[in-house]
Amino acid sequence: MFWMFFFTTSNRAAADGGNIITRERQPGHQIRWGIMGTGAIASDFVRVLRHLPDATVVAIGSRTRERAAVFAEAHGLQSAVLHSYELLALDKTVDIVYIATPSSRHVQDSLMCLQG
């Protein structure tokens, strides 16, 4: 079984010559997600992740720590580490980042995660 990395922080690579890099998934391995953004789309995504047995949200990035804390509380993610966008991109405990920032920031935030 394989899974894809789109915006990884631990591997620091998402594409190699235009090809998506995959890594063999170890049975029982939890995929540790970081959520960048705290709006409605991020909320929807977290609700979907709850249905995946091997997914866990470990970090939340927001423009302010207060917004990240409100988001974590609303979704029962009190154990998630709260970060700025920049610190989330550098977090080595995160396997993959879901970018839920405004679309005008997607390129900037994607590159920041890839370069992290």
Image (cartoon, rainbow, N blue to C red):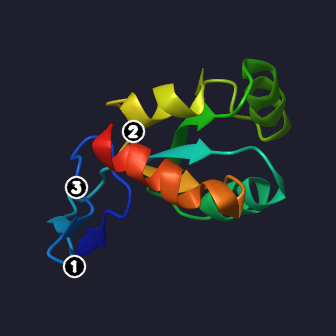
The label on residue 94 is 2
The label on residue 18 is 1
Q: Which amino acid does label 3 sit on?
A: Ala
Q: Position of residue 110 (x, y in %)?
A: 45, 54
Residue at x-position 57% and y-position 59%: 106
Q: How far apart are marks 3 and 2 (CA)?
A: 13 Å
- The quadrant in which residue 5 appears is bottom left
Q: Which amino acid does label 1 sit on?
A: Gly
Tell me if 96 is positioned left or right of 101 in this view.
left
Q: Earlier in the sequence, mark 1 or mark 3?
A: 3
Q: Under tag 2, what secondary structure?
A: loop
Tell me if 9 is positioned left or right of 51 in this view.
left
Q: Which of marks 2 and 1 is nearer the N terminus?
A: 1
Q: Is residue 30 visible?
A: no
Q: Under tag 3, what secondary structure?
A: loop
Q: Which amino acid does label 2 sit on?
A: Val
Q: Where is residue 7 in the image (x, y as percent from the top left)?
A: 38, 56
Q: Distance between the residues labelled 1 and 3?
A: 11 Å
Q: State which quarter of the image contains the N terminus.
A: bottom left
Looking at the image, the residue that sits furthest to the bottom is: 19
Residue at x-position 50% and y-position 59%: 107
Q: Mark 3 points at which residue?
A: 13
Query: In the picture shown, does residue 94 fall above or below 53?
Result: above
Q: Distance between the residues labelled 2 and 1?
A: 23 Å
Q: Position of residue 45 (x, y in %)?
A: 68, 61
Residue at x-position 50% and y-position 51%: 108
Tell me if 30 is positioned left or right of 11 in this view.
right
Q: Can residue 86 be seen in this view?
A: yes
The one of 92 and 53 positioned closer to us in this rendering: 92
Q: Which mark is nearer the camera, 3 or 2?
A: 3
Contact? badges 2 and 1 (CB < 8 Å): no
